[in-house]
Each structure stands twice: as C-alpha cells, then as structure tokens.
Amino acid sequence: MINLINCFSQWAIPLIIAVIISIAFIKKLKVYETFTDGAVEGIAVGFKILPYLLAMLMAISIFRASGALDILLNLLARPMNLLGIPKEVIPLALIRPLSGTGALGIITDLIQQYGPDSFIGKLASTMQGSTETTFYVVAVYFGAIGIKNSRHVILAGLIADLAGFLAAVFICRLVF
C-alpha cells in the first residue's frame, strides 16, 4: 500500500500536466502561447498587488515594533489560560490573520523551542492549517481588484479564524 502511495505521489503532477497538454492538443489549443500569455498577466497582477502587499507588511511591522502586540498578549494571557489555551500560541492566533509569513516565523520559533512532537508544536501546526490570513487576503487581493467595502468580509473571516483557532485547540486537546 505504501509503495502504491509513493508511486502515485511521484507521478501525480507529471500526469496532471500530461493530461492538460493532451486535452489542449486534442482541442487544438496553442499551449505555449496560452501559457506565456498567462505568465505575462501573472506578472502584471504581481506588480498591481505590490503596493497593497508592502502596506500590509509595514502595518504588521509597526504593530509588532510599537509594543501593541505585547500589550494585547498580556491582556489575553489570563482568559486564555482559563480556557486551557497555552500562552505560547497566543501570538500565533493574533498574527495569523495578519500575515502568513509572520505566523510561519512564530511556528518555527515554537517548534525549535518546544519540539515538533510537543503539544505546543502540534497545536501551532494545527492552528496554521485551520486559519487564514484574513487581513492579508482582504488588503492584497481585494485592493488589487478595487473592492472598497470589505467590512462584512473581514468580520466573517475573523469569525472563521476564531472558529478555526478554537477547533484546533479542542481537537489537539482531544487527540494529543
């Protein structure tokens, strides 16, 4: 069974590419030209979202450097402890909606400090997969396509992040 899974995982992407090229050939599509046109559009989109990305990264840096993150952590430590949530993962819960890269940095530090098989390491990894970078998505992608009124999207995204965070804690407490 494991050999079958390994074989499938090694050939999955080449097979998908071969199927796409075969279908395009059958439909008489110009694969190379379509690919290069898409690449040109991708570069244009990259340049278009760059200002929004830089603004978001600067806001995150200001939030962390100003000490606002530390103040918020001190306020949340006691209530989180009552809920059985380790204080070590609170920064991850706060940064994850803002920045995936920042959250990854926090997870890396937690795993280096506590180990990947520790409860904190497993909880941090589960939280990373259970939540989204809500503000990043809204700032970069909504900004790139010109959506101005994102109030309900942010609220819905933050509620989903909170649900993902609490579900990660519940499941990790249950399983580990």
Image (spheres, grey):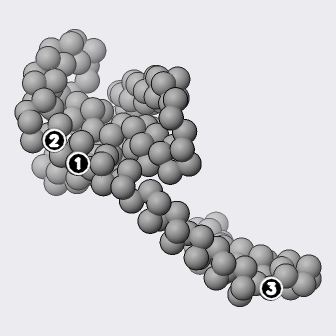
Marks 1 & 2, CB-CB < 8 Å contact: yes
> Three-letter amino acid code at disc 3?
Lys
N-terminal-most mark, 1 or 3: 3
Residue for badge 1? 58
For this rendering, which residue is in front, 137 or 148? 148
Residue flagged by tag 1: what amino acid is it? Met
The residue positioned 16% from the left and 24% from the top of the image is 72
The answer to whether residue 169 is above or below residue 3 is above
Name the residue rendered at 71%, 87% in the picture.
32
Q: Is residue 151 visible?
A: yes
* Whole-percent x, y for residue 158 in the image: 43, 27
Q: Residues within 10 Å of mark 2 (few under 14, many from 20)?
A: few
Circle nearer the N terminus (2, 3):
3
Instruction: Point out the image quarter for the C terminus.
Output: top left
Q: Which mark is residue 62?
A: 2
Q: Find the distance from the CA under tag 1 to the CA under tag 3.
A: 42 Å
Q: Say whether residue 90 is left or right of residue 29.
A: left
Question: Which amino acid, by three-letter code, is at mark 2?
Answer: Ile
Q: CA distance from mark 1 to mark 2?
A: 6 Å
Residue corresponding to mark 3: 30
| Circle 1/circle 3 CB separation < 8 Å | no
| SS assignment at label 2 | helix
